[in-house]
Amino acid sequence: MTTNITDLFTDEASNGILDLWFADAGPYPTHEQAMRWFKADEGFDEEIRTKFGPLLTQITSTPPSTILSLATTPHRALSLVLLLDQFPRNLFRGDLSAHVYTTTDPLAIAVANHSIAHNLDLGPNDEWRALLSRRMWFWLPFTHSEDPALHVRAQKEFAKPVLELIGDGEGKEMAAMLVKSGAEHLEVVEKFGRYPYRNKVLGRESTEEEKKWLENPVDWAR
């Protein structure tokens, strides 16, 4: 018997995703708390796999239009983006990462586009407009793309405006870091037309220039 995705992606599941991802991180997480999101941690990966691996498997075989229909509130939209954009990066590392680039990333971009178009990235009552610890997840899928236009959009429409909005207020360091990171990602995609570090798992032949770059890539491309 096939289980309907709407029966799996409940408010309880959505809240569970947010509770797991943000844990003790408040609106303005410390550097240490933020690193939990980006560094490899087998324990954290396994917790994600145990709690949400089956949901991720089910949702990736769901029609995109049905997936978009699940994003009915800011919190549900945020949890959906995390499920499709971040959780796969925890569960499919190294040689398994092709699944991320070919399957879940396109779905995450679709959800991000839908959410932004409906202002869901701004949060309930506009609470996330300048709150990077929540809003940035809607825009990160664009920086995972190999389409330079999406990177430019993320920089122009999100990162730089939010940096200006925050000014010297709380979150300014995270905002500056986001702008810098986005610029670095864009530079690589504009130079090569793709992310060279993905070539091996995607079965792509690296150019001589890419091979040279891969000898000493930036930290996030290792």
Image (cartoon, rainbow, N blue to C red):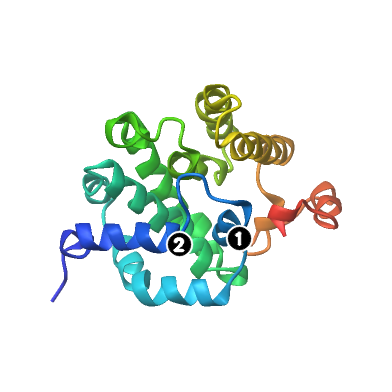
Occupied quadrant, residue 54: bottom left
Work out whether 156 lies above or below 222: above
Identify which amino acid the numbered label 2 is placed on: Phe
Disc 2 crowd rating (10 Å Cα; few below 14, some 14-19, many 20+) is many
Image point 58% across, 68% down: which residue? 93
Image point 21% across, 43% down: which residue? 72
Residue 101 numbered tag: none
Work out whether 116 lies above or below 69: above
Identify which amino acid the numbered label 1 is placed on: Leu
Disc 1 crowd rating (10 Å Cα; few below 14, some 14-19, many 20+) is some
**Residue 153, percent from left and from top:** 53, 28
Is 73 left or right of 206, judged from the image as shown? Answer: left
Is 162 left or right of 94, judged from the image as shown? Answer: left
The Cα–Cα distance between marks 1 and 2, rounded to whole angstroms, is: 20 Å
Task: Give the farthest residue toward the left.
Answer: 1
Is 201 left or right of 19, judged from the image as shown? Answer: right
Q: Give the number of the mark in front: 1 or 2.
A: 2
**Mark 2 or mark 1, which is nearer the start of the sequence?**
2
The one of 107 and 70 positioned closer to us in this rendering:
70
Residue 87 numbered tag: 2
**Residue 174, percent from left and from top:** 60, 40
Kindly indicate whether the residue at mark 2 contacts the one at mark 1 (C-beta within 8 angstroms): no
* Quarter placement of the C terminus: bottom right
Occupied quadrant, residue 187: top right
Q: Secondary structure at mark 2?
A: helix
Work out whether 1 lies above or below 171: below
Image point 52% across, 27% down: which residue? 162
Residue 202 numbered tag: 1
Image point 65% across, 57% down: which residue? 198
* Quarter placement of the N terminus: bottom left
Q: Secondary structure at mark 1?
A: loop
**Residue 176, percent from left and from top:** 65, 34
